[in-house]
Image (cartoon, rainbow, N blue to C red):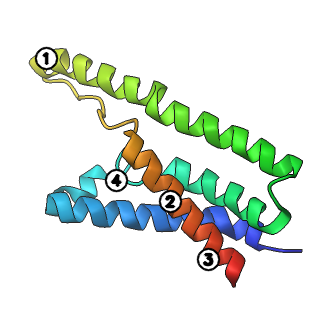
Amino acid sequence: MDYKYAVTPIFAWLVAGSVKFLVNYIRFRKEAVNLIGNGGFPSTHTTVISSTVFFIGFTEGIATPMFSLGLAVLMITMFDAMGIRRAVGKHASMINQYVRLDSAKTLRERQGHTPIEILGGLSTGFLVAYLLHSI
């Protein structure tokens, strides 16, 4: 049994999280710890799914049912991150304007991703899959 199929998404998650922390540390220094979570560069969800899809493509080929299914899940994940989750972040921002007046706990506003963050997730996923396929 090839354990790389199970290792690929876990390794991709670790790589994406590390890159995201480094990017936040370079941009915001001490605030980086508070920015761990949804949103930011690269998209961890996109990295995890794309690494798995690309690994399947490298290993089994792109003309397989698993690759096609993975590609569909990847597209749903990316559109969700740029659409629905980003809208949730905008709504949280609007709600927080009212909540701040009431001194209650605010909602997290960084939820979705920009197209650049999604592209970063795709690139990171590709690199992880290529690396694991090559070894």
The correct choice, above or below, for 51 with respect to 88 in the image is below
CA distance for labels 1 and 4 = 26 Å
Q: Residues within 10 Å of mark 1 (few under 14, many from 20)?
A: few
Could you tell whether 82 is left or right of 129 in the image?
Answer: left
Residue 52, located in which quarter of the rendered image?
bottom right
Instruction: Identify the residue under disc 1.
Output: 102
CA distance for labels 3 and 4 = 26 Å
- Point out the frontmost of discs 3 and 4: 3
Identity of the residue drawn at 50% across and 67% down: 14
CA distance for labels 2 and 1 = 42 Å
Sequence-first tag of 2 and 3: 2
Task: Please provide percent x and percent y for residue 135.
Answer: 69, 85
Task: Please provide percent x and percent y for residue 82.
Answer: 45, 33
Identity of the residue drawn at 54% across and 39% down: 78
CA distance for labels 4 and 2 = 20 Å
The correct choice, above or below, for 4 with respect to 98 in the image is below
Q: Residues within 10 Å of mark 2 (few under 14, many from 20)?
A: some
Task: Please provide percent x and percent y for residue 115.
Answer: 41, 41
Residue that extends furthest to the front in the rendered view of this protein:
63
Instruction: Identify the residue under disc 2.
Output: 123
Kind of residue at badge 4: Ile
Q: Residues within 10 Å of mark 4 (few under 14, many from 20)?
A: some
